[in-house]
């Protein structure tokens, strides 16, 4: 069972994603939006990080840069999400994929089930 870590500040979205992903057989860990996300990724070693671009007090692109600079976690698969179409910017920062909110649950599940190409 793949472990998915959620870094999202919309609690309704977090609760929906937890329910959806658990129903689909994923192990889900939800982080507090103010958490040290790179440290949590290093500690919990998720298969995939679902990272919101615009967290309340953090910049998802800066977090993405930090993850890709770290030797220990740079190969972690990261799917970035946002209500604004910033796909190109996310991909330039090293995201593996991007989903524009609101997205269909099936689109997320399909992405999560794709094989990961390591960096």
Image (cartoon, helix red, strand yellow):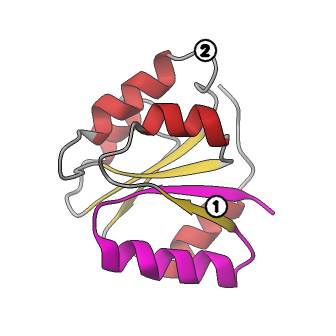
Q: Which residues are magenta?
A: 1-26
Q: Is residue 104 visible?
A: no
Image quarter of the N terminus: bottom right
Report the side of 95 relative to 45 (left or right).
left
Q: Residue at x 33, y 80 (%)?
A: 12
Instruction: Name which residue lies at 37% across and 55% down.
Output: 32
Q: Which residue is under mark 1?
A: 112
- Would residue 4 be counted in the magenta stretch? yes
Q: Is residue 25 magenta?
A: yes
Q: Which residue is mark 2?
A: 71
Residue 69 seen in the current view: yes
Q: Is residue 60 above or below residue 25?
A: above
The x, y position of residue 51, in whole percent, is 41, 50
Q: Position of residue 74 (x, y in %)?
A: 58, 25
Question: Is residue 2 rendered to the left or right of residue 103?
Answer: right
Element on which disc 2 rests: loop
Q: Quadrant of the C terminus?
A: top right
């Amino acid at each position: 069972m793949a472990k998915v870590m959620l870094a999202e500040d919309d609690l309704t979205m977090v609760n929906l994603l937890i329910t959806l992903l658990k129903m689909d057989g994923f192990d889900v860990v939800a982080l507090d939006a103010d958490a040290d996300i790179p440290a949590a990724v290093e500690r919990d070693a998720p298969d995939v990080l679902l990272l919101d671009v615009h967290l309340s007090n953090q910049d998802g692109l800066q977090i993405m840069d930090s993850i890709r600079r770290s030797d220990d976690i740079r190969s972690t698969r990261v799917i970035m999400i946002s209500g604004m179409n910033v796909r190109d910017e996310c991909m330039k920062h090293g995201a593996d994929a991007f989903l524009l909110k609101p997205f269909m649950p099936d689109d997320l599940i399909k992405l999560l089930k794709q094989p990961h190409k390591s960096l």
